[in-house]
Amino acid sequence: MSIRTVCLTSVIALIAGAAQAEMNFNRIASFETSANMAAGEDKARETSAEIIAATADGNTLVYTDSPLGVLGMIDITDPAAPKPLGNIALGGEPTAVGVAGGHAIVGVNTSESYVAPSGFVAAIKIVDGSVVAQCDLGGQPDSVAIAKDGSFAAIAIENERDEDLGDGRTGQLPAGYLVKVGLNADGTLACDSLQKIDLTGLAEVSPEDPEPEFVDINAAGEIVVSMQENNHMVVVGADGAILNHFSAGAVDLEGIDATDERGALIFTESQMGRVREPDAVKWIDDTHFATANEGDMDGGSRGWTIFNKNGDVVHESGVSFEHALVQIGHYPDKRSDAKGVEPESIETATFNGTPMVFVGSERGSAVGVYDVTNPAAPVLKQILPSGIGPEGYVALPERNLLVSANEVDLIEDGGARAHVMIYELAEGAANYPMLTSEGTDELIGWGAISGMVAGEGSTVYAVNDSFYGFQPTIFTIDTNSMPAKITNALPVTRKGHAAQKLDMEGITLDGEGGFWIASEGRTDRVIPHAIYNVNAEGEIKQEIGLPAELMAVEKRYGFEGITKVGDTLWMAVQREWNDDPKDHVKLVSYNLETEEWGAVLYPKASVENGWVGLSEITAHGDYFYVIERDNQLGANAEVKKIYRIPAADMKPAALGGDLPVVSKEEVRDLVPDLQAFNGYVVDKVEGLAITGEGKMWISTDNDGVDDSSGETFFWSAQIEDKAF
């Protein structure tokens, strides 16, 4: 076996808009919250970043970390290279934070039970972590807001309900309320000024149990309060008197996918009179505020709304925000249930004279960037990948920065850690999305892109895997546009119905206008290991099961790619089967004319952590190209590479005996490419297509946004080699 490296010139297709001197947000850095743990701490513990704020100079971020019970701090003097500043223990669960002067104003929940809520607000000196002042709140704090002039803080005392009690509805006492507390000139708390503002008797749903959720303060010192479960909004004057209150109302939704966990994206359903139940709320100016309509008990309208403080709806997004996320592959089908993409977070700021609203989708793991120069007609400018489960945002317009705090930590499942992500507004094209279905006549939902193959000209075909088991689909992608465009979705069918029991992991052209599909079997779920011939209409015309010699040694991790050379199909097996030597996997052949099976062995890398396998095979010129990857992500990612095998080595031997071992040459290390996207390095590099000119298109599988950031990376690299 020999390994050498082939020289390539990168042409990573990061551009998602016209190459003009336009201004766009792009992610420039990510910070893993576990990095704030001190030396010797157990970094395998769950951590999080929920609500986030920044110092006045924009150089330091502070965020609440509920699992650890700490306030985390990050130095972003150089925003492209954030540095850990450590954690501050708080003696309870931090729920929200704002910054006044040099102090973090933190709400801390110390409740013993739902019926005995308690908590305090503390002023913590950011430079040394010392607690300067602490005020008892008499209940469980949720949101904290700081007046723009730094004169006071507003705190929502939620006193949240026990969702396991009775039917889990509101009407559980003690009631929540609003707190207003003065701040001294240096930003410390003036506890003797603390004022409790009663919010009972206002809402129609549960007037005795308001459960205030989120607060914000405008330049006039007026406080807006969302009462999520009550579907109600309250505006409180600078003197603490209630100026106005009104129902948040309802929305009629059409063209939605409201059925949970069916493994298909079908946007044909409706929900009439869906109550908004807003979570986050932020003032846009002194008259208008925006809400993220997450929902809780009875609703969640999947979008966001701009209200006038007199109660008028100035703008309602309806399903437009959700549909925009569908088009870029960020629709969370298996988590959508009744709430869809679940908008939870709102941030507002003015960048270079343009008022903007940032709408965070908790389940879609993305943030929409809107120009609200005209509050009645917001313009969606971008959608940014936000990290898993964005909970809070802070905008720093003086530094042209936006920061997201992402609460989900998947350490127990071996997944991605919680992150803080940083975006910069600068001249240049948007780097994300890299793949979209925008512009089609009908809404195309997609995700979990797996195998790929190059078609004619700039066309690439791709398949989704078993995540969408009730909607196996072949996607047509036009790579000429930036971002690349999904122009068609062809259902794979049997007798006119969506084909079941498929896990499509590879696709290649059959030379007759159709395709060959490789399906990765899983016998414990009655999914067969097989290859399928699909015609141009998507109908399965032929099914070929594996021979007895292979089925006798089969394991779960089967075919992960397919390619065709002459009359022979070649399939890559992802991991070792029972008869394979350690760190060797089969490349299996099937001759369509003779119906003979054979195989060679491929030598894969050996790693200390996790496993390594193959996820694609593509024949081109005098070589077969494969993707070899480990199952690690983030800083643990080690093997994400493209190798090539001389076609002369691909001489299959009969199954059941000794198999020849092929040689391989390293073509490209994909880890630097993945790092260049400035998020965490994802694990599933799954697709590879090579055009006639030797341009390689590479894609990642976003797992259908299930325990994933939802990001699909789709980029290209050009091979410089005499073979082309």
Image (cartoon, rainbow, N blue to C red):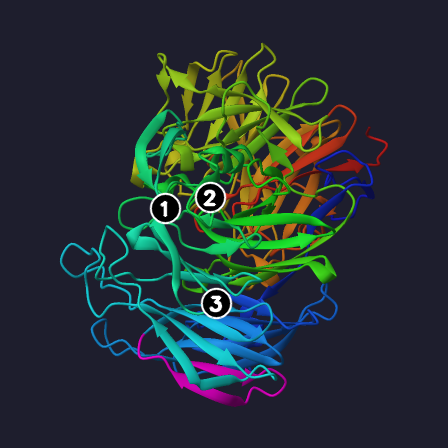
Nearest to N terminus: mark 1 or mark 2: 1
Q: Is residue 86 above or below residue 405?
A: below
- The answer to if 137 sits in the magenta stretch is yes
Crowding near pointer 2: few (<14 within 10 Å), some, many (20+)? Answer: many
Q: Residue sitting at 66 percent across and 53 percent down?
A: 350
Q: Are marks 2 and 3 in contact (CB under 8 Å)?
A: no
Between 539 and 107, which is closer to the camera in this rendering? 107
Which residue is disc 3 drawn over?
238
Q: Would residue 46 be counted in the magenta stretch? A: no
Q: Please say if the residues under marks 1 and 2 sit with CB atoms less than 8 Å apart.
A: no
| Amino acid type, callout 2 | Trp
Instruction: Indicate the position of residue 590 as horizontal and vertical percent values.
Output: 52, 24
Q: Is residue 387 visible?
A: no
Marks 2 and 3 sit apart, C-alpha to C-alpha, by 26 Å
Crowding at dot 3, Cα within 10 Å, few <14 / some 14-19 / many 20+, comes out as: some
Kindly give the residue lying farthest to the right in the view shown: 722
Give how far apart the Cα atoms at labels 1 and 2 are.
Answer: 11 Å
Question: Horizontal and vertical percent for residue 395?
Answer: 62, 59
N-terminal-most mark, 2 or 3: 3
Instruction: Give the label, 1 or 2, closer to the camera.
Output: 1
Label at residue 114: none
Instruction: Please provide the residue range marked out in magenta.
Output: 121-139
- Please indicate whether residue 451 sits to the left or right of residue 311 in the image: right
Q: Which residue is mark 2?
A: 304
Q: Which residue is mark 1?
A: 248
Of circles 1 and 3, the one toward us is 3
Please tell me which of labels 1 and 3 falls first in the chain. 3
From the top left corner, tell me how far across and down residue 373 is, in percent. Answer: 64, 42
